[in-house]
Image (cartoon, helix red, strand yellow):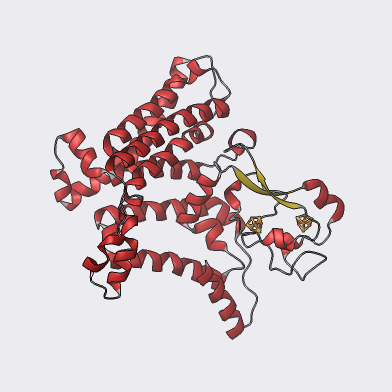
């Protein structure tokens, strides 16, 4: 976003004008689905063109995301791209719901002592508050009911003259059962990020199901297999929800888009289990590979390579998946507020997908 901010300042300096206000109604309705579509496109691009191992394609991905931020910053006030359209921002906002920290202002102090609202509107320095342009994503820290729309930039903390803004500790994910703001696009994103783990292990998945990964040799077969992998969590979780309804005809469960947030810890930990492999092997080659980029022969820096033992990686991956199942089980109960047995199909779906991920990742 730093490029967006620089572009905004530069364009206003070169061409002084008023930036457009945000089309909030439109963005609330469609922004989430646009970022969802962007994420689907990135995942398919990554899988079908081997983006993660092709440097110029990875570069293009960064250029496109940065260009989105820059174009929106030239057209609209503040950080419209970050709040509504950025696929990475959407993922961060979703996982931020599980955070054990939150930034909030104290409503009592705000309503009793403040009439400038510098945290939100921006303005010059006032008392102990510093001059700022206000919250870059147009959130008021006293009205945040979840972490999704706060990027923890601390602008409001600097701007507030009344010491109202605080960074609090909290039970992880508390907003999911106290102030649930369920949205369909966010649940679709959650299930997509779950499917992404299966997609990243497509050769293992096709070998497990078909006995070989030959189907991935042709583009069409590869594309179909990729779409099926992305859809597996959607199919299993929807089936589980239907089973909950069928097995308990007299019981009216909460809507699917509310209950689906219970899967969030397992989605996070499944992604972690997948990326641990890369984080604990390839990340240890950053220094030699960076030096190789500027001409240092790799042989002379081989001693700087660091990699975890495969057994350590497997242990951590297994621990992640077990922790994900337990935490998801607890969160499902918290969100649904129903007896365990009535939600049994949803718990079974959690275990099933964790076992599948275990087989693919470990
Ligand atoms: S957080 Fe500070 S600046 Fe913002 S409304 Fe409350 S008291 Fe005013
Ligand atoms: S930390 Fe930043 S994004 Fe969050 S409410 Fe404060 S100003 Fe807005």
Pick whichever, 351 or 337, lies toward us: 351
Instruction: Name the residue at 20% across, 33% down.
Output: 209
Q: Is residue 338 above or below residue 223?
A: above
Instruction: Name the residue at 37% across, 64% down.
Output: 61
Instruction: Name the residue at 69% across, 64% down.
Output: 134
Pick whichever, 89 or 80, lies toward us: 89
Quadrant assignment for the C terminus: top left
Res 174 quadrant in image? top right
Left or right? Give the position of 27 relative to 237.
Answer: right
Q: Residue furthest right?
A: 112
Instruction: Name the residue at 50% across, 67% down.
Output: 69
Q: Is residue 95 above or below residue 333?
A: below
Left or right? Give the position of 63 relative to 56.
Answer: right
Q: Is residue 303 above or below residue 292?
A: above
Left or right? Give the position of 334 relative to 323.
Answer: right
Q: Is residue 15 visible?
A: no
Q: Position of residue 188 (x, y in %)?
A: 44, 42
Q: Total number of numbered labels? A: 0
Q: Position of residue 47 (x, y in %)?
A: 27, 52
Q: Position of residue 310 (x, y in %)?
A: 27, 42
- Report ligand 2 position as a quadrant: bottom right
Q: Is residue 332 visible?
A: yes
Q: Is residue 69 above or below residue 215?
A: below
């Amino acid at each position: 976003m730093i490029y967006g901010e620089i572009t905004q300042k530069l364009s206003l300096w070169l061409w002084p004008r008023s930036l457009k206000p945000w089309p909030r109604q439109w963005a609330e309705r469609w922004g989430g689905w646009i970022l969802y579509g962007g994420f689907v496109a990135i995942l398919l691009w990554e899988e079908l063109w081997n983006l993660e191992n092709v440097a110029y394609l990875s570069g293009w991905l960064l250029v496109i995301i940065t260009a989105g931020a820059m174009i929106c910053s030239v057209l609209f006030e503040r950080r419209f791209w970050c709040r509504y359209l950025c696929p990475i921002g959407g993922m961060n906002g979703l996982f931020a719901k599980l955070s054990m920290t939150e930034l909030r202002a104290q409503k009592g102090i705000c309503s009793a002592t403040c009439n400038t609202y510098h945290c939100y509107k921006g303005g010059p320095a006032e008392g102990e508050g510093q001059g700022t342009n206000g919250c870059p994503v147009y959130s008021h820290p006293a009205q945040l009911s979840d972490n999704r729309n706060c990027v923890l930039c601390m602008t409001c903390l600097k701007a507030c003259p009344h010491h109202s803004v605080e960074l609090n500790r909290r039970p992880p994910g508390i907003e999911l059962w106290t102030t649930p703001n369920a949205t369909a696009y966010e649940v679709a994103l959650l299930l997509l990020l779950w499917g992404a783990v299966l997609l990243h292990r497509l050769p293992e998945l096709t070998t497990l199901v078909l006995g070989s990964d030959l189907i991935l040799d042709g583009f069409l077969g590869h594309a179909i297999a990729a779409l099926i992998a992305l859809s597996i969590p959607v199919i299993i979780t929807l089936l589980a929800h239907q089973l909950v309804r069928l097995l308990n005809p007299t019981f009216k469960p909460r809507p699917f888009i509310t209950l689906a947030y219970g899967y969030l810890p397992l989605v996070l930990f499944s992604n972690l289990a997948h990326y641990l492999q890369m984080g604990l092997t390839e990340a240890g080659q950053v220094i030699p590979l960076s030096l190789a980029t500027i001409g240092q022969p790799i042989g002379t820096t081989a001693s700087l390579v660091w990699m975890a033992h495969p057994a350590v990686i497997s242990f951590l991956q297994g621990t992640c998946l077990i922790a994900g199942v337990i935490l998801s089980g607890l969160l499902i109960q918290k969100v649904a507020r129903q007896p365990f047995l009535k939600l049994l199909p949803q718990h079974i779906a959690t275990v099933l997908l964790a076992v599948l991920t275990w087989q693919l990742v470990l």
